Image (cartoon, rainbow, N blue to C red):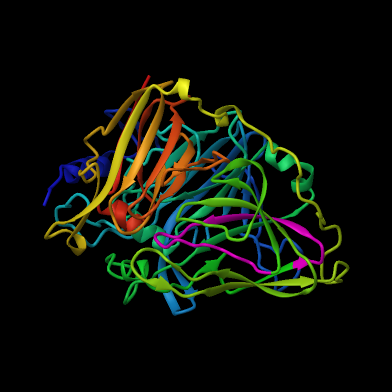
Amino acid sequence: MVSHSYLSRRNFLKQSIGTATIGGGLVLCPWTTAGAATAKTTPAASPLGIADDLANPSEVHSVDGRLRTRLFMSIADVLLPSGPAKLRIFNESLPAPTLRLKAGDTLEIAFENRMPENPDTTAMVLNVPNRFNTTNVHYHGFHVSPRGNSDNVYLQIEPGHHFNYVVRIPEDHPAGNYWYHPHRHGSVSAQVASGAAGMAIIGGALDTVPEVAAAVERVMVLQAPIPGVDGVLATEDPIWPPLNGERNFLINGAYRPRIYMREGEVQHWRVLHAGDAQFLPLTAEGLELYEIGRDGNPLPRAEIVDTVDLAPGNRVNLLVKATKPGTYQLLRPAFNQGKQPLDEIMLADIVVIPANDSRVAAGKPFGRDIPAGDLPKNRILTDIADSEITMQRKFVLGMSEVKGFFKDTEFTINSQPFDPRRDDVTAKLGAVEEWTLVNTTPYPHPLHIHVNPFQLMDSNGVPDPRKPWLDTVAVPASGTVRFRTRFTDFAGRYVMHCHILPHEDTGMMINVNIEA
């Protein structure tokens, strides 16, 4: 086993939060209360105004270029399909409120860790789950600084402590779906598996496409919360079996809800897979599904699909067209994640009602069309040519049996488990690189890289003609993925890791250091 100096650093942070500047650019700021809530809020509500329709989560909107709000994590009582449960979640809400911003905005969050002291006080072992009440907040997919009090996943915010996040979003940030969730190594899986997550939407050019602007918008956060065996999760043991077994998926906290559409209507669904481990393909027979965006990044054109494949961490913008009245089903079709087949499950009923149904509130939009032309492009999403490449790298995803580790398992990248003290990739700001990921395990791994999106070139050697821009990609079992990325705008240290979060907590993560 590898013991780790994490413990002394943790104690130092615990004593220092609120006042200190730590080496390496880590800035901890005093938590303030003056003016800590400056934003427009909207309650959870059906986008059609129908009583038993799936409600969009509550939202917090930026005002005059700033979204300033409070966020806290606590242990809350929640009713799940399996019964009453205690979950670690944000703002006692499942899911957490949606943050709605624009490119160029500043996000200011006064964050508070309201959880009790950690019951485990023995020395921590790196890459063994620990300290489930220590946390932080990651802004998944944001192209922002990873330093200081921005999207800094090396922070450890202890129970009873506060922290101010200030995240400045570039003026040319792509428009789309992002999200926020905890990312403190050692406790990330337990907290996301509890349901600590919320959507973040950055508005922009995609929203001004006439066919998109005309559509009713649904925000849909898919989660499968796991409670502890007796009370709150105290170990990752309950999480690991559901990697290969059935789970109760919720949409916006609701189990098997109704989703209403009108005959002939096109709705814009912003879908987030905020689960911790299990892949989630989606189908809806009898309806037309068009993908227009992935991971916050617009696709070149609207593309009709039969199945939407989502790995943990993926987001998708869908235009969904209803045909004739009737009840249809949103399904997770049968599939195999590498160990055992999983049966089809029903996630929601989609009820298509007459176009003039009186239950729909007056004045609701009624989109009917799918965009036929090219979708808007973005400066940081232009194709990466062969001539731009400054470095090629290979990363091998693996696992090994290590006695004494959790489940006697350690996950690795290039034969090494995660070590926060080691820089695995060092590059200069402005570099353009091509990375090949090689999976040596018998199941897929969704790899997520922070700060800079990447352009997918091929999977298992088969080129993707769309060359989509992503931040999370599934590397097939015993397969390969090749992508290209530009290190633009932001120097600093961040991570790439598997978004099957029990794999991250047990070692499948590396550090990337971009130098100015």
231 shown above or below 168: below
193 shown above or below 341: above
Most common secondary structure along the magenta stretch: loop
Q: Out of 496 and 485, give the one closest to the viewer.
A: 485
Res 419 → quadrant = top left
Q: Out of 400 and 2, give the one closest to the viewer.
A: 400
Q: Position of residue 206 (x, y in %)?
A: 68, 40
Span colored in magenta: 261-285
Residue 94 appears in the picture as rendered? no
Q: Position of residue 52 (x, y in %)?
A: 70, 74
In this image, 296 relative to 138: left or right?
right
Residue 56 appears in the picture as rendered? yes
- Label tally: 0
Q: Out of 93 and 445, give the one closest to the viewer.
A: 445
Q: Residue furthest front?
A: 462
Residue positioned 26% across, 59% down in the render: 118
Residue positioned 76% across, 57% down in the render: 266
Please tell me whether residue 277 belongs to the stretch shown in magenta. yes
Which quadrant: the C terminus? Answer: top left
Q: Out of 165 and 114, give the one closest to the viewer.
A: 165
390 shown above or below 237: above
